[in-house]
Image (cartoon, helix red, strand yellow):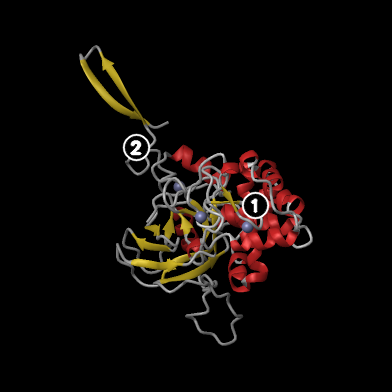
């Protein structure tokens, strides 16, 4: 079982379009809503059963005490559908929609079973069909079949055995390719992926992100691997965005992977979240409450390392998740009394002849 941590490729969406979903903003949102105005649309197709209401999208994996709400500021997010006790399971054993190597390509993983491989890869085993690195040529792991079939169909294979030694960053293209394979192979999963935000407009305005994806994902898939006739540049960029915004980092330390899950991606961010989550050997994800969550309150997780201080968390959230967090913790320079990012300083008060220790918070 592993704690997901958020970094360059981690989860999630900025579900507001401009501001961010924070506890404070949510409260404001609730309080300021004019009386009689439509509350928040319930999206699950359950509850408020108005036969004439437009059909709401269905979300896979929502079997626990949660429901989806939608607001102008936050977009879609999960709330407790009843009072939830601390320690209670909220989402259980969610099957990943897609799973594969994290960005960067190191450590290098077997693309079929995700065990760590030794370097250089050219001296190890490779897939006899496409040439990508495996722990053994007949590794029975389930993960490689999707991209292997596409690579073989594209006709650019077998790839050179030292390709991922020279270009480890090409590992970045594997999970996007596995996502794209769902379009024809598993329309139900593809539909679930397409319910997730990609924020192409925001990401396109950030050349560092957009161009990196162009070089490390779009170009390899469409040009080097000859799949341009199957996948448009827009489609590839969109799955890149879906992954950047929504993927969880899971798996054992040292060979962690990134994965997309149904339902769990709907949890909004808070720097003091009310849930924790873990995954099993098959990378199934479960979420449980760490605090009591009253009915109607958002079910949250942190898209940033909670042990990092506010400066670094907010930087990560701004650059990687595209929002400025102004949650209760981010808004309090003592970080709710924890002084998590404060400097400890000592003063020598000569006059008093005593030492004094204190915190500097800004
Ligand atoms: Zn393997
Ligand atoms: Zn292969
Ligand atoms: Zn925050």
Quadrant, the C terminus: top left
Against 280, residue 118 (above or below) is above
The spot of residue 332 in percent (x, y) is 40, 42
- Residue that label 1 marks: 131
Q: Is residue 110 visible in the rendered structure shown here?
A: yes
- Residue that label 2 marks: 339
Q: Nearer the viewer, mark 1 or mark 2?
A: 1
Against 287, residue 355 (above or below) is above
Rendering quarter of residue 318:
top right
Circle 1 SS class: loop
Circle 2 SS class: loop
Which residue appears at 70% of the width and 49% of the height?
204
The spot of residue 281 in percent (x, y) is 41, 60
Question: Would the CB of label 1 be found within 8 Å of ligand 2?
Answer: yes
The spot of residue 263 in percent (x, y) is 49, 67
Q: Is residue 13 visible in the rendered structure shown here?
A: no
């Amino acid at each position: 079982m592993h704690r997901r941590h958020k970094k360059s490729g981690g989860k999630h969406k900025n579900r507001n379009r401009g501001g961010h979903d924070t506890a404070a903003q949510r409260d404001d949102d609730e309080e300021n809503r004019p009386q009689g105005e439509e509350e928040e649309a319930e999206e699950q197709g359950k509850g408020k059963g108005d036969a004439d209401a437009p059909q709401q999208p269905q979300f896979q994996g929502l079997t626990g005490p949660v429901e989806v709400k939608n607001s102008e500021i936050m977009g879609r997010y999960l709330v407790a559908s009843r009072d939830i006790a601390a320690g209670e399971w909220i989402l259980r054993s969610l099957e990943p929609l897609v799973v594969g190597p994290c960005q960067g390509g190191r450590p290098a993983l077997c693309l079929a079973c995700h065990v760590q491989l030794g370097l250089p890869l050219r001296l190890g085993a490779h897939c006899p069909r496409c040439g990508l690195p495996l722990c053994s040529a007949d590794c029975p792991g389930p993960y490689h079949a999707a991209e292997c079939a596409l690579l073989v169909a594209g006709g650019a294979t077998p790839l050179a055995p030292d390709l991922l030694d020279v270009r480890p960053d090409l590992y970045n293209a594997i999970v996007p390719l596995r996502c794209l394979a769902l379009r024809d192979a598993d329309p139900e999963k593809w539909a679930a992926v397409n319910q997730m935000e990609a924020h192409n407009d925001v990401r396109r305005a950030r050349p560092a992100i957009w161009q990196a994806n162009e070089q490390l994902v779009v170009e390899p898939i469409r040009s080097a691997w000859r799949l341009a006739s199957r996948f448009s540049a827009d489609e590839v960029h969109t799955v890149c965005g879906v992954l950047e915004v929504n993927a969880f980092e899971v798996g054992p330390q040292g060979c962690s992977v990134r994965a997309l899950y149904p339902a769990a991606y709907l949890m909004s961010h808070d720097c003091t979240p009310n849930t924790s989550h873990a995954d099993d050997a098959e990378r199934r994800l479960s979420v449980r409450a760490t605090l009591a969550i009253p009915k109607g309150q958002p079910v949250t997780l942190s898209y940033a390392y909670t042990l990092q201080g506010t400066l670094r968390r907010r930087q990560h959230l701004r650059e990687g998740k595209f929002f400025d967090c102004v949650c209760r913790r981010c808004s309090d320079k003592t970080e709710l009394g924890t002084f998590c990012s404060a400097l400890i300083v000592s003063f020598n008060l000569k006059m008093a002849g005593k030492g004094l220790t204190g915190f500097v918070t800004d």
